[in-house]
Image (tube, grey):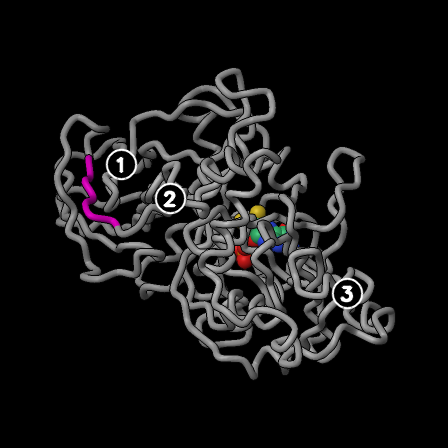
Amino acid sequence: MRTGDRDDPDLTDEATYERLRSPSRRALLRLSAGAGLTAGLGGGLLTALGPPAAAATAARAGAARAGTASGGIVKPLPPELFIQHGTNAEMRWEAMHRQGYLTPADRFFVRNHTATPLIDPRTWRLKLWGTGLAGRPTEDRPIELTYEDLLGLPAETLTASIECTGNGRGFFASQQGQGASGTPWRLGAVGVARWHGVRLSTVLRRAGITREAVDIMPRGLDADYVDKGENLGRVRRPLPVAKAMKDVLLAYRMNGAPLPPDHGHPVRLAVPSWVGIASVKWLGDIQVADEPLFSPWNTRYYRLFGPEYPPDGSAPLTTMNVKSAFELPWDATLPAARPLALRGRSWSGGGRIRRVEVSADGGATWRAARLRDRRPDPRGWTRWEFPWRPQRPGSYELLARATDETGATQPATVPHNTLGYLFGAVVRHPVTVI
Ligand code: MTE
């Protein structure tokens, strides 16, 4: 991934973007963010989406949440497929054994700040508003799009992972002896699906995004998130216009079926290669602004905090790092003196996986695994296989280390951050051979 330079900044990289979004650099931002937009933006295209809502109040009520799943998550969470962590459910990696390339919806992890809302697509509306749209529609009189409108727009399919930024967080404590606050996921807060829907750029263009627009703020329809007694409002995570216009999908289907309730029904964002929080579920509205936007989800969360970082944390986190997992139970039991084919998957927000090495002796020696996918989607993962014949019964640690097409690889340890994001070190997977 390009890190961006002064003349040609990569505005899909938030570290670059963060430097530029300061008021003194706004002119440059505007220039660059608008550069990718086609001509003909503005009022004429509004007709495709309908005029700003006349009866905005009624429509707001119509799109309100119809109810909330009892227990927070709608789908069954059988213990052989999931580990439950409060409002969240982690996929057990053995659930991917003998599965195809994609993660079936019944075993896709769920990360809910509150609870899955049950939304009727007939009354659902996507509202677009803000100073970055022609005519500057307000939140009370937004441009509106129905579910049917969305289905009528040109659609695309995208195979991509969605991964929680805290995936692997539990290993900060178990492998590095320094815990972090938040859900102690192992490696099961990731899944790869085929997302089908309309490019966000299509909708933003038709809504009349202007060259002045710099940020968008998609917001979910789930309940307000309350953190230690403080109401932070509905989940919303700003995106730079450059990323929003590049490769983001308004997805309404997952793996060939309508989006399930837990994964954002009726419509969610699928933001490939980026931190999972960007893929806002149960999308209700999108603010488009001619000035930088902030929410707790790009200020107090989803940055790196700790003694090694500035007091306000790092730049907002964007691209996910390289990781690998074995399709085995944690503490699996395996037979001795028999040829085994260990299988697993590796993935990276940086692009396609080029190499995977496996160690069956705790990291003393490494051998290359065989990559099973010839041309995996760079935004998905790569499956691999490693032959192993353990001679003696006993306890072993299996390690897998991947390298992506940018040369990024998995180190033995990673620097600590207090919220436990981006654990990209090699995970030591314990097994017992009998
Ligand atoms: N969108 C809303 N509205 N509410 C949420 O709680 N969680 C985010 C993101 N989108 C969330 C959301 C986080 S942190 C992640 S990792 C992904 O959704 C998880 O998507 P999934 O539950 O479909 O796996």
Q: Which residue is mark 3?
A: 65
Q: Which residue is mark 2?
A: 8
Residue 161 within the segment the image draws in magenta: no
Q: Badge 2: few (under 14), some or many (20 or more) residues near its Cα, within 10 Å?
A: few
Which residues are the magenta region?
A: 353-359
Separation of marks 2 and 3 at Cα, in angstroms: 43 Å
Q: Earlier in the sequence, mark 2 or mark 3?
A: 2
- At 50% from the left and 72% from the top, the residue drawn is 197
Q: Earlier in the sequence, mark 1 or mark 3?
A: 3
Q: Amino acid at mark 3?
A: Arg
Q: Position of residue 254 (x, y in %)?
A: 49, 70
Q: Nearer the viewer, residue 95 or 204?
A: 204
Mark 3 and mark 1 in contact (Cβ < 8 Å)? Answer: no
Quarter of the image with the C terminus is: top left
Residue 409: mark? 1
Task: Determine which quarter of the picture holds residue 425.
Answer: top left
Q: Amino acid at mark 1?
A: Thr
Q: Badge 1: few (under 14), some or many (20 or more) residues near its Cα, within 10 Å?
A: many
Q: Amino acid at mark 2?
A: Asp
- Judge depth for marks 2 and 1 and give the one in front: 2
Can you say whether 102 is above or below 175 in the image?
below
- At 43% from the left and 31% from the top, the residue drawn is 171
Horizontal side of residue 44 vs 363, given as left or right: right
Farthest-out residue, top: 307
Residue 356 within the segment the image draws in magenta: yes
Q: Element under label 3?
A: loop
Q: Position of residue 396 (x, y in %)?
A: 25, 32
